[in-house]
Image (spheres, rainbow, N blue to C red):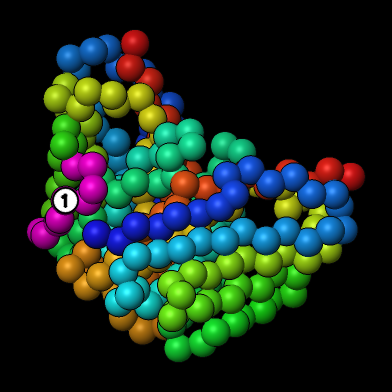
Amino acid sequence: DGGITQSPKYLFRKEGQNVTLSCEQNLNHDAMYWYRQDPGQGLRLIYYSQIVNDFQKGDIAEGYSVSREKKESFPLTVTSAQKNPTAFYLCASSKTSGRAVGELFFGEGSRLTVL
Amino acid sequence: GENVEQHPSTLSVQEGDSAVIKCTYSDSASNYFPWYKQELGKRPQLIIDIRSNVGEKKDQRIAVTLNKTAKHFSLHITETQPEDSAVYFCAARMNSNSGYALNFGKGTSLLVTP
């Protein structure tokens, strides 16, 4: 069953701690993305990666870091430098060629709460 | 970068009525305009999309129209049902410098009352 898996679904963090959110896909998609969702704010792009070993900052990259060592995996680290990290984080992937290019498939999300 | 404005932020209709959500975008080079539906606590899912070489696309009760000259596109839902209640997001593909990333509107919370 193909899809995108995010873990954990819920995560609590103390201030000053880094946390890493996992995102794995078996859709054989080249591109992967991280979005942040806050109430009334829509989805805002944090980072994206079009190919393995390459990634680009989105609109709100400050306080976050990513890696793309494997095609299937695109973990997001929320660092202590992120001033307001409590949010719902969505990972997505897409094709970069062929039919349905650019259509984003989302994971179920990870809800991070900073205590 | 691309800026997508979406209106209204909330919309309440009676079952059976139509609902219309409108979006505008700023980058004239944008060429892909999807609509996503997000039910409470779930992931956004694509319901319909349109590319810049067509002006209208329909799929059963939902349709999307695109006016490239005016840089706006709209979602139309006819014969609404309570299960249509959700948050709807429009999006536009950013320019080629951002690969295939989408820029989203802030969402419209649609409530269909029986």
Q: Quick check: B111 above or below B99?
A: above
Instruction: Pinpoint residue B84: horizontal percent, then vertical percent.
Output: 73, 53
Q: Pick out the residue farthest to the front.
A: B70
Quarter of the rendering containing residue A72: bottom left
Q: Where is residue A29 in the image (x, y as percent from the top left)?
A: 32, 67
Q: Is residue A40 placed above or below B96 in the rendered structure?
A: above
Task: Compare residues A48 and A45 and report the one nearer the observer.
Answer: A45
- Left or right for A108, reference B13: left
Queried whether the magenta region covers residue A54, the answer comes back as yes
Crowding around mark 1 (Cα neighbors within 10 Å: few <14, some 14 to 19, many 20+) is some
The amino acid sitting under disc 1 is Lys
Q: Mark 1 lies on which chain?
A: A
Q: Dot 1 corresponds to which residue? A: A57
Quadrant in the picture for the C terminus of chain A: top left
Toward the viewer: A6 or B83? B83
**Residue B20 within the segment the image draws in magenta:** no
Give the residue drawn at x 59%, y 49%. Answer: B8
**Count of all numbered marks drawn on residues in the image:** 1
Q: Kindly identify the residue that appears in the image at 50 percent across and 54 percent down.
A: B6
Q: Is residue A2 visible?
A: no
The picture quadrant where one finds residue B56 is bottom right
Residue A7, placed above or below residue B46 = above
Label 1 sits on a secondary structure element that is strand
Q: Give the range drawn in magenta.
A: A53-61
Using the image as rendered, state which of residue A90 and residue A27 is in the foreground. Answer: A90
Q: In screen coordinates, is A21 left or right of B114? A: left
* Picture residue at 29% right of the left edge, 26% below the top: A85
Task: Report the residue that reaches farthest toward the left.
Answer: A53
Give coordinates of residue A80: x percent, y percent.
16, 22
